[in-house]
Image (spheres, rainbow, N blue to C red):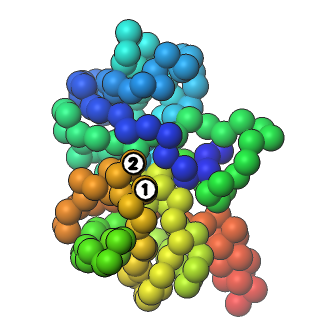
Amino acid sequence: MFTGIVEDLGCIEALEQEQENLNIKVSSKITPTLKIDQSVAHNGVCLTVTKIEDNCYWVTAIKETLDKTNIKGLKVNQIVNLERAMKLGDRLDGHIVQGHVDQTGTCINIREEEGSWRFTFEYSPAYNNMTIEKGSITINGVSLTVVDSKDYSFSVAIIPYTFEHTNFKTLNTGDAVNLEFDVLGKYVQKMHQMQK
């Protein structure tokens, strides 16, 4: 489990294809705290640490992960949002995040406002996901509040701290992002569908 509060920005140091898997080498200041077999969210995708070398560690993304996330589009020197799994008893500053991406979305607009930014995203209706006004959404592993919820699109308001301390500062229109919809909302939606 994660909270959607980004701890650090990692840099992609190497990408190695191994059959249908992608091995990813990441450098980060959190590396000395990691252990092999530990879960770390990368742009909201829960991946397992497989090897540690100096200030870098390796994780592996399997075909299922590559098919459903923006991990397949990573490039060397790209910045990713990182969060270690939460400790039981810690404050839940964001919201309940599983690290299981539901689908990708596309950034369709970025508007600088006086002291903040508004990012708008759209997503495919194929997976029956939905947002609600003032509900929670995780974008590239960042816990955010939905504003301007519409069918298959929504916006989020980004404060300067979040902009500077996540990879939102590198996002451009047309970029793919990982979306994890609120787990409680997914259960309510499923129960509603079963009652029909």
Q: Residue furthest right?
A: 89
Q: Is 85 rendered above or below residue 122?
A: above
Vertical order, 118 against 50 (above or below): below
In space, the residues marked 2 and 1 are separated at their CA atoms by: 6 Å
Location of the C terminus by quadrant is bottom right
For label 1, count other residues whose C-alpha is less than 10 Å away and answer few (under 14), some (14-19) or many (20+).
Answer: few
46 with respect to 57 (left or right): right
Q: Which residue reaches farthest front?
A: 115
In the image, is 34 to the left or to the right of 195? left
Q: Position of residue 7 (x, y in %)?
A: 50, 40
Q: Residue at x 39, y 27 (%)?
A: 28
Q: Position of residue 71 (x, y in %)?
A: 32, 44
Residue 166 is at least partly visible in this image: yes
Give the total number of marks visible in the rendering.
2
Q: Residues within 10 Å of mark 2 (few under 14, many from 20)?
A: some
Mark 2–mark 1 contact, CB under 8 Å?
A: yes
Question: Label 2 is placed on what type of residue?
Answer: His
Query: Which quarter of the rendered picture does the N terminus lie within?
Result: top right
Answer whether residue 69 is visible to the viewer in this image.
Answer: no
**Where is residue 70 shown, x and y percent of the image?**
32, 51
Query: Left of 31 or right of it: where is 104?
Result: left
Instruction: Give the residue at mark 2.
Output: 165
Q: Which mark is residue 161?
A: 1
- Residue 135, given in percent of the width and then of the height, sits at 59, 76
In the depicted view, which residue is nearer to us: 104 or 172? 172
Residue 136, image quadrant:
bottom right
